[in-house]
Amino acid sequence: MASHLSAPETAIQTVVATAELTVDTTGIGFVDITREAARFLDECRAADGVLLLFLRHTSAALTIQENADPDVQRDLVTALDRLAPAGAGWRHDTEGPDDMPAHVKTMLSGVSLHVPVAGGHMQLGTWQAIYLVEHRAQPHRRHVVLQFLGSGW
C-alpha cells in the first residue's frame, strides 16, 4: 500500500480563544453544531491550529458523522438503543428509565473532539459535520466549551 505524507507546516501559537455554546435539544437525536463552530473560528480570527470541543454533560455526546443522509443518524440512534436499552434493569434510574442508558451511550461516543484548522477553516471531510447527540428523551439545555489553540490573522 502506497502512502504520502505532505511537508509539515508550522505556526507559532499566538491565540487561545474560548467560548461556550448553549444548545437546546428537543430530545433524542443529533443537533448539527458545525456552523456555530465555524462562526467561533471566524470571531476569534483563527488561522492555523486546532479546535477543541468539550461537552459539559454525562448523558449527551459529541461526534463527527456523515451530514448527507439523515438515515445515518436514525440508524446510529437505533444502534445505540440496542447497545444500551432503556428497560435493561439498570440500578441507576434517579432521573428516569433513560438516564443510565444515556450515560452508557455517552461513554461509548465521548464528550470531546478535536478538529484541525488550516487557513481559518476546519479540515472536515466532504460529508462530515460536528454533532451534539442528545441521549435523553426530554429536551435539555446543553453546554459545549469551544477552544481554539493556534495562530490568528
Image: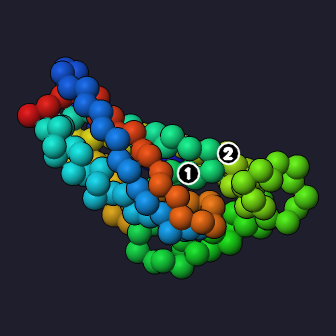
Three-letter code for the amino acid on which mark 2 is drawn? Met
Q: Is residue 113 visible?
A: no
Instruction: From the viewer's perspective, tell me whether residue 23 is left or right of residue 122.
Output: right
Residue at x 46% of width, y 77% of height: 69
Residue 149, how many percent across, how many down?
29, 29
Rendered residue at 77%/50% (across/down): 94
User: What is the spatial separation of the Cα atoms under label 1 and label 2, in whole angstroms?
Assistant: 8 Å
- Return the x and y of residue 124 as percentages of the image width and height: 34, 53
> Three-letter amino acid code at disc 1?
Ala
Sequence-earlier tag: 1 or 2 = 1
Other-residue count near label 1 (Cα within 10 Å), few / some / many at <14 / 14–19 / ≥20: many
Whether residue 68 is situated above or below residue 133 in the rendered picture: below
Quadrant in which the C terminus appears: top left
Q: Which mark is residue 61?
A: 1
The kind of secondary structure element at disc 2 is: helix
13 left or right of 136 in image: left
36 left or right of 152 in image: right
Vertical placement of residue 60 versus 113, above or below = below
* Residue with the mark numbered 2: 107
Q: Is residue 117 above or below residue 17?
A: below
Q: Say left or right for 26 vs 89.
A: left
Q: Secondary structure at mark 1?
A: strand
Q: Residue at x 21, y 51 (%)?
A: 39
Residue 5 versus residue 136 in the image, above or below: above
Q: Residue at x 60, y 66 (%)?
A: 138
Among all residues in the image, which is located at the extreme left? 153
Kindly indicate whether the residue at mark 2 contacts the one at mark 1 (C-beta within 8 angstroms): no
Residue nearest the viewer, comparing 64 with 88: 88
Q: Which residue is at the far right?
A: 89
Q: Position of residue 92 (x, y in %)?
A: 82, 48
Where residue 100 appears, x then y in whole percent?
A: 76, 52
Q: Dot 2, crowdedness within 10 Å: few (<14), some or many (≥20)?
A: some
